[in-house]
């Protein structure tokens, strides 16, 4: 099912996830757009090309939101955690009586996405993209209108991924953990350390190359020191340099991460997928079958292909 979009359409996003899901829906004739983009979404939207005559707002402030919503027939927003931009847009749309749909692109923290400063603002409709998310949204928003729509982004990503390569290679899909789990070190680094300790027990030879793919919100150089330490220990680690996630997964035989959307994409492409959350972190909240947690018996179960990932020289 594809979304029913009203035009003129105000589109407001900050985080990359919802922007990725929304962009393919906008590729249709006759759609007049009023985009207001911040953070990683601004870069994604600009890179995707011109989506109509209305330029992306240079600064996603109150004036930009007001201009985008002036005369709009609908607001389509993301639901990211890293900004209140989308929350403010939904609040303004409510005040103006403009129909609003909000895209939930993941499977965690549903209620928190619509709360800022003790204020809760629901859209007219919650839009999700699979049956897992549909069930979570219906539980979280009783009485709310929840629609499950086609994830054209995920479909295109999986279709673009190359067949399983012969040479073993691990891709680590990074994301901010937003917690140190009481240990005084950012959770994403704890997860990286946990992966390096457990990879051999999970059937990944120590010589197998490991490539890190930072999250769009990660600042440049964030992982430089960690990489240098691992290289001093003899590990073949570096940043992934592929232009797209699909290309990065296509070059990999195993994809590792905490709760990244990249894990779901990798599952769709038939890759081995491991969750690197350490034992003291909360359970992985991705509801998809096929994700094994490092440090458990399930992580060592052989997937399709050889029982051990060995480098091919």
Image (cartoon, rainbow, N blue to C red):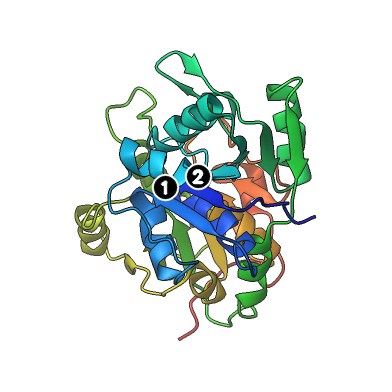
- Percent x, y of residue 45: 43, 61
Among numbered discs 1 and 2, the one appearing first in the sequence: 1
Residue drawn 75% across and 28% down?
A: 138
Disc 2 packing (10 Å; few <14; some 14–19; many ≥20): many
The quadrant of the rendering that contains the C terminus is: bottom left
Name the one closer to the observer, 245 or 111: 111
Residue drawn 71% across and 46% down?
A: 288
Mark in the foreground, 1 or 2 = 1
Local SS, label 2: loop
Q: Is residue 168 visible?
A: yes
Name the one closer to the observer, 212 or 310: 212
Assess whether mark 2 and mark 1 are in contact (beta carbons under 8 angstroms).
yes
Which residue does the numbered mark 1 point to in the structure image? 175
Name the one closer to the observer, 99 or 289: 99
Q: Residue furthest front?
A: 71
**Count of numbered tags:** 2
The quadrant of the rendering that contains the N terminus is: bottom right
Q: Is residue 215 visible?
A: no
User: Is residue 25 placed above or below 97 in the rendered structure?
Assistant: below
Which residue does the numbered mark 2 point to in the structure image? 258
Name the one closer to the observer, 154 or 249: 154
Local SS, label 1: loop
- Percent x, y of residue 235: 32, 65
Q: Is residue 140 left or right of residue 181?
A: right
- Percent x, y of residue 58: 28, 54
Cα distance between the residues tagged 1 and 2: 8 Å
- Percent x, y of residue 54: 43, 61
Tag of residue 10: none
Residue drawn 40% across and 38% down?
A: 66
């Amino acid at each position: 099912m594809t979304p029913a979009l009203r035009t003129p359409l105000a589109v407001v996003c900050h985080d990359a996830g919802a922007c990725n899901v929304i962009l393919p829906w906008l590729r249709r004739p006759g759609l007049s757009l009023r985009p207001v983009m911040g953070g990683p979404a601004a870069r994604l939207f600009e890179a995707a090309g011109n989506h109509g005559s209305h330029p992306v707002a240079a600064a996603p402030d109150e004036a930009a939101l007001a201009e985008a919503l002036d005369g709009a027939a609908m607001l389509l927003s993301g639901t990211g955690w890293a900004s209140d931009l989308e929350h403010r847009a939904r609040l303004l749309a409510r005040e103006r009586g403009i129909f609003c749909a909000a895209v939930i692109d993941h499977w965690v923290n549903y209620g928190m996405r619509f709360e800022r400063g003790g204020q809760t603002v629901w859209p007219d409709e919650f839009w999700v993209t699979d049956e897992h998310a549909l069930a979570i949204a219906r539980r979280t928003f009783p009485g709310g209108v929840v629609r499950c729509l086609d994830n054209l982004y995920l479909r295109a990503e999986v279709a673009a991924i190359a067949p399983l390569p012969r040479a073993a290679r691990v891709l680590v899909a990074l994301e901010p953990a937003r917690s140190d789990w009481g240990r005084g070190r950012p959770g994403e680094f704890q997860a990286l350390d946990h992966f390096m300790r457990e990879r051999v027990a999970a059937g990944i030879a120590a010589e197998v190359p490991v490539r890190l793919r930072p999250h769009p919100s990660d600042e440049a150089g964030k992982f430089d020191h960690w990489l240098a330490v691992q290289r001093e220990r003899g590990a073949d680690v570096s940043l992934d340099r592929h232009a797209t996630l699909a290309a990065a997964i296509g070059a990999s035989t195993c994809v590792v991460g905490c709760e990244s959307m990249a894990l779901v994409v990798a599952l769709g492409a038939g890759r081995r997928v491991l969750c690197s959350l350490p034992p003291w972190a909360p359970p992985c909240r991705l509801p998809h079958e096929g994700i094994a947690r490092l440090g458990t018996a399930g992580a060592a179960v052989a997937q399709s292909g050889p029982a051990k990932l060995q480098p091919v020289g």
